[in-house]
Structures are given as structure tokens and as C-alpha cells.
């Protein structure tokens, strides 16, 4: 049986915060959660609020929002209705689009350190394990839904994972709650509904304890995923190059293939990039890690790129189009570039000698550029060959011109005619890419 007081232990384990939010759809599960937390208000100090996400997908969506507001008013709980726009005819799953829009809205609502409770229960967890299994997920996917996870500036907590849908329904009926029945929840075109209504009842006829068994599977996989993360952090730390965006190839190659994949997944996740598929990771190991030393292979996927240069691996977001246009720069104001930004840092006796307010042009490599450095004319091509700048970034390197003369290339060279002398006011040019100086 479900009893509100059983949630107290969960609440007591949470860090103190100013506000609790309940993601309140108006359906059975979230209504039970909202009602239970309302009963517990005298026993916690956080302010209790509700947020209803108005998807606008159902003709009754406006009525549902009004129902949720009325329920919250009866419970003396402030309710925020947050409307979202879900794109249609994109080819993507409507389920996935609605979920992404919902979580994005919840992120926007949460303040720093605040907690959002969602009403996922044990049967939802069992369904998620099967859905992930059918999608060919690995350990992390089969761990299904964690009890808590970061969400925006705060946290998402699922306090009902130990309870079944039947237990929540019994509580709702006992308390004479009135909830919304969304007819889309029986639409078998959606994967979760098909599994819930057509597949699981058949499986449960044979394996009556299927739901708690699948919940244990999720717990086992979560523990296994935790161990993989611990091993991955140790391996990744050993593999780091000069920055966390670089890995030393020789060290990575000494790991077993499975540990290589584990490191690569963790590395990409730490850079806040979407993960490549299993097939793409296999191609990365085959075509990038084991390419000949004189090659500069690259693996691209929708969320990012991994490149190899001078025995280092680099992970970066997808690169923009190679710039072909000229930019005007009022020196020394910050200049946004197609890739990163260009700024001038005040110095004395070191760097570029140029008056403030000078209008400059910033162009990108065409070929044949020259500067006079230490009394000798040098081609930019040769200057770049002795720098650590990876070759794929050179097309984005900002070249600073005064009228038609190339006078400086950030962190590469300054023409002798514009180089400061001892004691003179000067400027250090810095090209920032992905928050780091190249």
C-alpha cells in the first residue's frame, strides 16, 4: 500500500532547498504525488509548487490546464502553466519531441538548487527497461531512470519508483481523487503504449513478477554503469593531453578495446556532446585510432567530431562553414568570429603597436600570405608548420589587415612594422575557440 508518510524518508535524504516543484500533468500518477506531498507540507520547509506543461497536442489541453489549476487552488499550491510548442512533420517521434519539450520547460522553471518531483513509478521503470532493450541499449540505457539526476540549475527526483501503478490507483480511489484520462495513453501507435497495453499483459501472464524483476535489472545495470564510470574516470585521467579536449593516442591504444570505448564515451559526455552510435565508435577505433602516423583521420557524427593530429585525439563540436567573407574590426573591441572570438589584451612592450579605434579588416586564409618577422619575410604557411595549431583549425584562423597589409596573426606572428618596442603601450591578440585560447 502507498502512504504519504513513506515519502518522508526520501525527502529527508534530499539536500535542503528553497522550493519543491511537482511536474503535474493532471493524470493519476502526478495527482497522487501532488496530493501526497501536500499532506506532508507541515514536515518540510521548502515551498511546494506545481508546474503543468501545456503541450497543446490534444483538443482538451486547455481544459486540462484549467483542471490542474483548480486542483492546485483547492490544495493551496501555486501552479504555473507552461505552454510549449512542439514541431510537427519533422520525421522525429512525437513522443520524443513532446518529452524533449517537457524537460526543456522544466529546466527553465527550476531555480538554482530547486527540486522537481516527477511521478514515474515502478511499472514505468519496467517499461523503460524493455524499451531500452528493444533499442539495443547498453548498460547505461538498461539502467533506465535514475532516482535523481541533474536538471537545469536543479535536480529531478523520482520518489515513486518503488510503487506500482496499482498501488497509486488504490490510493487515488481511497482519497476520492479526480484525475485526467488522456486518450493518447491508449494510442498503440506510440511505443510505450503498445508495450504497456499489448505486450506486458501477455508477458505477465507467464511471469507474474515481471515488473519488480525488471526493476531489479535496472538496479543491477545502474550499479554496473557506476563501476564503468569509476574505471573510465581513472583511464581518462591517464589519457588526457594538454587539455581535456585532447587524448594521448599512445596511452589510449594500450587499453583493451572495451576500455577504449568506455573512455571515449565518457570523454565525449564530459564535453557535453551527444554520443556517437556503437557502429560509429567501432569505426573510430578502426579508422582513427589505428590509422597510419602520417594520416589525419576524422570521425563526424551529428553531435560532434573527433580528429587526430600529431598523436593526439581532439573532440570538438561540429565545425561551422569555412569563412569566406571579410570582417571589419574596430580595434580593440571584442570581435565575434565564425569560430570563436578575437580580442586584444592590454600589454606593455610586448605585442601589437596600434592606436585604439583603428579600423581593421579580418580575413581568412586564401594562400600566399606573408609577414616580415625579425627582418625576414616569411610565408604564413611556413609559420603555421612550426606551430601546434591543428591543421583543420587553420582555415578559421583570423588574419588581421590594415588596409591591404597583413599586420598580425593572433598568437602566431606580428609584422615587424607593428611590433611594440620596450615600454610602449601594446596589445596581445588572443583567438578564443570553445572557451580556450588556441
Image (cartoon, grey):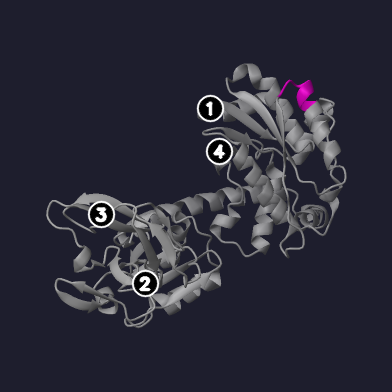
Magenta span contains residue 76: yes
Is disc 1 placed on a helix, strand or loop?
loop
- Contact flag, marks 4 and 3 (Cβ < 8 Å): no
The span picked out in magenta is 71-77
Give how far across and how far down residue 355 sits, in percent: 27, 54
Q: Is residue 251 left or right of residue 289?
A: left
Q: Find the distance from the CA under tag 4 to the CA under tag 1.
A: 10 Å
Which residue is nearer to you in this view: 311 or 131?
311
Location of the C terminus by quadrant is bottom left
Where 196 falls versus 401 (above or below)? above
- Contact flag, marks 4 and 2 (Cβ < 8 Å): no
Could you tell which of marks 4 and 1 lies nearer the N-terminus? 1
Crowdedness near tag 4: few (<14), some (14–19) or many (≥20) residues, C-alpha within 10 Å:
some
Residue assigned mark 4:
155
Give how far across and how far down residue 58 sits, in percent: 84, 47
Is disc 2 placed on a helix, strand or loop?
helix
Residue assigned mark 3:
427
Could you tell which of marks 4 and 2 lies nearer the N-terminus? 4
Q: Find the distance from the CA under tag 4 to the CA under tag 2.
A: 41 Å
Q: Find the distance from the CA under tag 1 to the CA under tag 2.
A: 48 Å
Residue assigned mark 1:
17
Amino acid at each position: 500500500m502507498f502512504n504519504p508518510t513513506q515519502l518522508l524518508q526520501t525527502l529527508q535524504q534530499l539536500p535542503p532547498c528553497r522550493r519543491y516543484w511537482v511536474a503535474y500533468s493532471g493524470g493519476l500518477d502526478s495527482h497522487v504525488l501532488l496530493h501526497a506531498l501536500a499532506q506532508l507540507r507541515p514536515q518540510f520547509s521548502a515551498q511546494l509548487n506545481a508546474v503543468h506543461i501545456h503541450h497543446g497536442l490534444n483538443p482538451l489541453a486547455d481544459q486540462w490546464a484549467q483542471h490542474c489549476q483548480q486542483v492546485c487552488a483547492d490544495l493551496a499550491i501555486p501552479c504555473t502553466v507552461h505552454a510549449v510548442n512542439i514541431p510537427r512533420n519533422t520525421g522525429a517521434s512525437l513522443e520524443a519531441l513532446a518529452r524533449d519539450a517537457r524537460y526543456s520547460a522544466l529546466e527553465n522553471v527550476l531555480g538554482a538548487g530547486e527540486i522537481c518531483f516527477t511521478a514515474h513509478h515502478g511499472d514505468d521503470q519496467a517499461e523503460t527497461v524493455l524499451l531500452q532493450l528493444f533499442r539495443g541499449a547498453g548498460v547505461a540505457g538498461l539502467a533506465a531512470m535514475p532516482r535523481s539526476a541533474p536538471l537545469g540549475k536543479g535536480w529531478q527526483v523520482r520518489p515513486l519508483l518503488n510503487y506500482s501503478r496499482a498501488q497509486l490507483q488504490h490510493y487515488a480511489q481511497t482519497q476520492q481523487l479526480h484525475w485526467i484520462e488522456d486518450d493518447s495513453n491508449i494510442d498503440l501507435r506510440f511505443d510505450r503504449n503498445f508495450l504497456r497495453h499489448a505486450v506486458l499483459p501477455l508477458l505477465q501472464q507467464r511471469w507474474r513478477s515481471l515488473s519488480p524483476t525488471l526493476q531489479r535489472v535496472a538496479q543491477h545495470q545502474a550499479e554496473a554503469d557506476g563501476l564503468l564510470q569509476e574505471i573510465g574516470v581513472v583511464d581518462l585521467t591517464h589519457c588526457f593531453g594538454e587539455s581535456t579536449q585532447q587524448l594521448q593516442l599512445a596511452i589510449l591504444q594500450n587499453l583493451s578495446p572495451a576500455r577504449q570505448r568506455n573512455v571515449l564515451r565518457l570523454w565525449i559526455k564530459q564535453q557535453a556532446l551527444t554520443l556517437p552510435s556503437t557502429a560509429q565508435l567501432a569505426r573510430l577505433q578502426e579508422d582513427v585510432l589505428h590509422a597510419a602516423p602520417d594520416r589525419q583521420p576524422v570521425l563526424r557524427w551529428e553531435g560532434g567530431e573527433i580528429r587526430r593530429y600529431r598523436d593526439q585525439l581532439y573532440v570538438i563540436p561540429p565545425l561551422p562553414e569555412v569563412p569566406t567573407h571579410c570582417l571589419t574590426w574596430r580595434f580593440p573591441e571584442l570581435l565575434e568570429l565564425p569560430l570563436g572570438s578575437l580580442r586584444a589584451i592590454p600589454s606593455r612592450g610586448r605585442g601589437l603597436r596600434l592606436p585604439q579605434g583603428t579600423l581593421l579588416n579580418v580575413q581568412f586564409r586564401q594562400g600566399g600570405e606573408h609577414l616580415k618577422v625579425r627582418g625576414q619575410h616569411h610565408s604564413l604557411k611556413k609559420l603555421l608548420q612550426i606551430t601546434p595549431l591543428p591543421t583543420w583549425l587553420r582555415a578559421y584562423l583570423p588574419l588581421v589587415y590594415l588596409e591591404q597589409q597583413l599586420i598580425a596573426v593572433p598568437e602566431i606572428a606580428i609584422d615587424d612594422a607593428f611590433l611594440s618596442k620596450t615600454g610602449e603601450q601594446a596589445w596581445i591578440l588572443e583567438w578564443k575557440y570553445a572557451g580556450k585560447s588556441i
